[in-house]
Amino acid sequence: LKLQFLYLIATSACTHIPARAPSMPSGKRILFLHGLESGPGGSKARYLQAHFENVVVPDLKMSLFDYTKENSAVRNCMSLKGSMEGCINVALEAIAAEYRAVDPAGTKNGVTLLSDAQARAVNETLIIVGSSWGGGLALKLLERGIHPHSTVLLAPALGKKGWFGSLLWPAWCPGSLPAGGRGVVLFHGDSDDTVPVEGSRALKAKYPDIIYREVAGGDHRLNAALLEPSDGHPTGRLRAALQHILDGDLSRL
């Protein structure tokens, strides 16, 4: 009886996951950059892998105080700049590995450099999805000259609430984005009590071509607002948004 009970729990918990994720058109793929204390097994990573093929989720090895994480703030003397540099290279390594069949990447001072052929392939086929810390990382990649097909930001970490958070994590806004922000889609909840929504509003004001969707009542994780079924979005709003991007129909975002 106990085994039957556990079996029922396991099967019911997985009923929302498709047996096979739908194929991606024209060789497109998704690179998901997870949040600060999350990882490749987090809820958004699992959601994307359940609904799409060719989803790459590198382990950013990031945390504030977990010393076992290579890019943690505590291992970088509480310097988030040092942590970000480490995460940038993890992301670049993941991109280079994904496009190694196109052309090999190079390195300079230990930092991965994409070849011109890889950069063109990234521009044509890669969709970056970044959540919180991963959203801030995605913006740093854009600043560094990585120009993906599209970028989806989920409550990007452009600052942090509270006196300690603001001291450790000063607010910032990207100095430059390719194409004035075209190809960037930004979701942020107006009830986010972790990362101030004002940072995303300022980003939209600076780069008007960004497609900005403020989620009424949305918290920082945005799982309830974007991952769970809702009216008009039976598999979640995030899947629908990514499908519109894949279809080239940004007007429906």
Image (tube, rainbow, N blue to C red):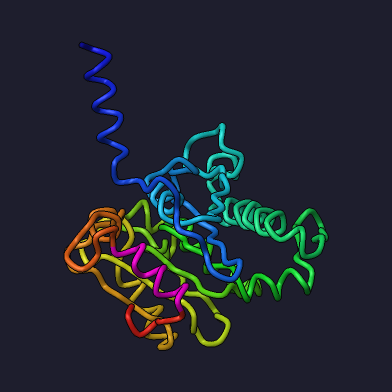
Q: Nearer the viewer, residue 230 or 92?
A: 230
Q: Position of residue 49 (x, y in %)?
A: 46, 50
Q: Nearer the viewer, residue 248 or 220?
A: 248
Identity of the residue drawn at 38% across and 63% down: 154
Q: Quadrant of the C terminus?
A: bottom left
- The answer to whether residue 15 is visible is yes
Compared to 234, does 63 lie above or below?
A: above
Q: Is residue 246 magenta?
A: yes
Q: Is residue 252 magenta?
A: no
Which range of residues does the magenta coloring cover?
237-247
Residue 11 occupies which quadrant of the picture? Answer: top left
Residue 159 occupies which quadrant of the picture? Answer: bottom left
Q: Nearer the viewer, residue 116 or 157?
A: 116
Q: Position of residue 200 (x, y in %)?
A: 36, 73
Q: Position of residue 32 (x, y in %)?
A: 50, 56
Compared to 251, does 58 lie above or below?
A: above
Q: Position of residue 212 (x, y in %)?
A: 34, 78
Q: Nearer the viewer, residue 227 or 204?
A: 227
Principal secondary structure, stretch drawn in magenta: helix
- Answer with left or right where residue 198 lies relative to residue 22: left
